[in-house]
Image (tube, helix red, strand yellow):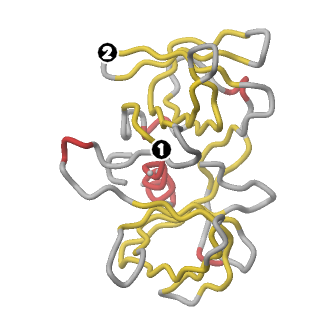
Amino acid sequence: MKNIFPALVLGVTSILSMSTVAAPARAEEKKAAPIHVRGSIVTYAGSTLEVKTREGETVNVAMADDWKVASVADAKVTDIKPGDFVGIASLPNADGGDGALEVLIFPPAMKGTGEGSYGWDLKPDSSMTNATVADAVKGVDGRTVTVTYHGKEKKIAIPDGTPVVTIAAATKDDLVSGAVVFITAEKAATGPIAHQVVVGKNGVVPPM
């Protein structure tokens, strides 16, 4: 995500800007790569979010002056249509190709955000591909999607059960103890500084 996602503009504008969570800054821009904090909220106190990470640590995340919040809503594989812009985290398959770990369907206004395919930290060896869907073909094991980016093409299998989500509204009131979060932040000597927070609500957690 070009302004830091992968991956997210909130109202409509804010929610869309959160979609950039799926895409880290492109390498050629020579900016420091964003860091990601995944875990559950311990406490939220205005300018600080205390998070227990998936690794078991507890970290204090400072909130940047311009930070935004959004959530995700459930979608279905069948919602993915040719021409949609998606962010797909995936892992290489043993028999070649990639298998999806999760899919984010971007709102139409965010088409092109963070376009490309690059390393991702959801799991070891995973990648994030932000690209346009060329076609969606039903296969014997879920669905295989062909996506295109920067003149390149990639086929990604989406096994049954793969989380598929889209961006939804959220407010600071949703930052409650126990809520699952995916945070895009910058690294600082004092600890992470968050620019974007995706928070789980209504039983849907950020799969990124």
| Residue at the limit of the structure toward the front, as seen here | 94
Determine whether, in the image, residue 206 is placed left or right of residue 185. Answer: right
**Nearest the camera: 128 or 20?**
128
The percent coordinates of residue 153 (x first, y second) are 42, 14
Asked which secondary structure carries label 2, the reply is loop
Q: Is residue 49 above or below residue 106?
A: below
Q: Secondary structure at mark 1?
A: loop
Query: Which residue is at a point 52% across and 20% down the rendered structure image?
Result: 133
Circle 1 sits on which residue? 120
Q: Which mark is residue 48?
A: none
Residue 99 locus on image (x, y percent): 63, 26
Which dot, 1 or 2, sits closer to the camera? 1
Q: Give amino acid for label 1.
A: Trp
Residue drawn at 58 percent across, 23 percent down: 98
Q: In this figure, which residue is indicated by the disc labeled 2?
A: 151
Residue 101 rendering spot, x and y as whole percentages: 65, 36
Asked where in the image residue 65 lies, by quadrant, the reply is bottom left
User: Could you tell which of marks 1 and 2 lies nearer the N-terminus?
Assistant: 1
Q: In the rendering, at what x and y percent does residue 149 appear?
A: 37, 22
Mark 2: give few (<14), some (14-19) or many (20+) Cα within 10 Å.
Answer: few
Q: Nearer the viewer, residue 73 or 109?
A: 73
Residue, far bottom: 45
What type is the residue that disc 2 sits on? Answer: Gly
Q: Looking at the image, which residue is at 80% across and 27% down?
A: 160
Please rate how many residues cluster around mark 1, counting C-alpha atoms within 10 Å: few if below 14, some from 14 to 19, many from 20: many
Q: CA distance from mark 1 to mark 2?
A: 21 Å
Q: Residue at x 59, y 62 (%)?
A: 38
Left or right of residue 151, residue 131 in this image: right
Quick check: 66 above or below 93?
below
